[in-house]
Image (cartoon, rainbow, N blue to C red):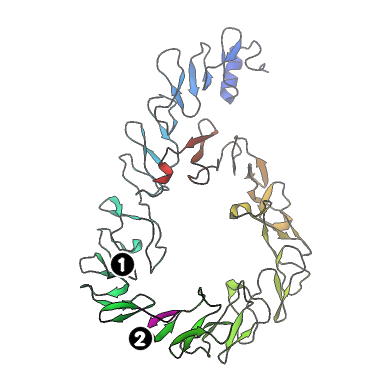
Amino acid sequence: MCPKPGVLTVLSACLVALHAVNLSPVRVRAEHAQPCPEHCLRCDASGSCLACAARYGLTSGSPRRCRACMSKECIDCNVDYRKCSRCGFGSWFYLDKAGRCKQCASIYGPCDQSAGCHADGRCKACNVFPDTFEDGFNPYDSFVMINGTCQPTPFGCLVSRTLPDGRCSRCIAPGYVLLHNGTCKECPSLCSNCTASGRCLRCNDGYSRQAGRCVKCSVRGCTRCSEDPSVCERCQTGNNDWVDGSLGLKEGKCVRCQDPNCSDCGSNWAKCRACVGPGSYSNGTVLKDGKCVQCLGACDPDRGSCDASLECPRCMSGWGKVGKACKQCEVANCSRCDGDTAKCLECDWVSDIPDATSVDDLYPLYPSRDGTACIKCPIPHALECSRGSRGGRATRCAPHFGAVGSACLPCRVKGCQQCNGDVNACDDCGGDDCFWNLGKYSEFDARTKACVTFFFPSPFCEL
């Protein structure tokens, strides 16, 4: 057995063994073990470094030392500190042909961060913000691949309807019109639909068209009025900011629907066309003979309201269907207890963090075998397991643990959040967000088996 490095006399055979298992950074002179130079992981008996820590590389000459990589975004320049072999920051940076790290993507830049860049700096894919509003303008600039480069989306065009040659096949609506040459033209002020020549065909909600101009309706809550702005033809449906409930027409004015559970009474304030579904303020109602009738219990909003029989297709979370009615579950943290409120069939997701806002902080509870309790996965340090309360295999572990085989084992890499499959590697070093982690980015370096932390260069996160 070798003595502890750096303390006792060691043999050259021990040096080989220590280097093979990559223990402490030590060197061996003739008789005594001494530490290697700063930032050096391994060195020979003369004190010349053989391998450097992440973000450091070897110098030339003798003895060799470790210096910080020339590119501050470089994670591996071990062979030569002046030339990078792998950039950090995931795909935010790319390695050019000269071995330098260059910025590829930024938060609102042209390149898609998840795809990265080619060695010549061209984007592999463009940064696209989804068409958040099919009938409205996305506040962020998106980019599309046009003739091999990422260019801003053409003026007024929906991102998803931009053609590879840069022409548009559909414009943002309302307020734009598509021209024959594949470009979008903005309509006149307050106009939602117009001709290519700019003649207004329809005004924005709350305005009427008079003599080619859009004039504001004088009826409160009105979305479309006649040529007389004091006479309304269509009222705002759903929630509004000045009356509790939906609106309907009554003698050219907008008034609250007669039925408080009505979500749409359209052209007749006294006759409902659609009822309020299940949600925060209602158990669910159904339309019968122009009136809204309450369901038999609290319906699940995701499964919709009841039918004409007043029976919910499924009860809301925390309730069970007993007969035709919904009754509250008796088991703590139970989300479904159909048939018997004292026996749970499905349990809630919970968190050990007070007021948790991220789904990553939640984990499921499982019904006990007799259904009288909701319990955690029985595997130590496991948040989810394949057979619920019976255990099985760990499918998700607590932070700093990894699912290996059927168990959750502690990660061996310092600072590692998840190490599924291999405790000596790391799937998630944490801290990879510009905003919430104050510009910090961490990633695993397989060569040195360490989590390496970078800081985004200012003003990188604001670009």
Q: Is residue 90 left or right of residue 405?
A: left
The residue to which callout 1 is attached is: 171
Q: Is residue 226 left or right of residue 355?
A: left
Residue 88 or 257: which is nearer the viewer? 257
Q: Is residue 22 above or below residue 350?
A: above
Q: Earlier in the sequence, mark 2 or mark 1?
A: 1
The residue to which callout 2 is attached is: 226
Residue 355 or 157: which is nearer the viewer? 355
Q: Position of residue 218 (x, y in %)?
A: 40, 81
- Give residue 84's quadrant in the image: top left
SS for dot 1: loop
Q: Amino acid at mark 2?
A: Ser
Q: Amino acid at mark 1?
A: Cys
Per the picture, the main secondary structure of the magenta-coloured stretch is loop
Boundaries of the magenta span: 216-228
Q: Is residue 333 above or below residue 226?
A: above
SS for dot 2: loop
Query: Closer to us: mark 2 or mark 1?
Result: 2
Q: Position of residue 5 (x, y in %)?
A: 63, 17
| Residue 219 lies in the magenta-colored region | yes
Q: CA distance from mark 2 to mark 1?
A: 27 Å
Disc 1: CA contacts within 10 A as few (<14), some (14-19) or many (>=20): many
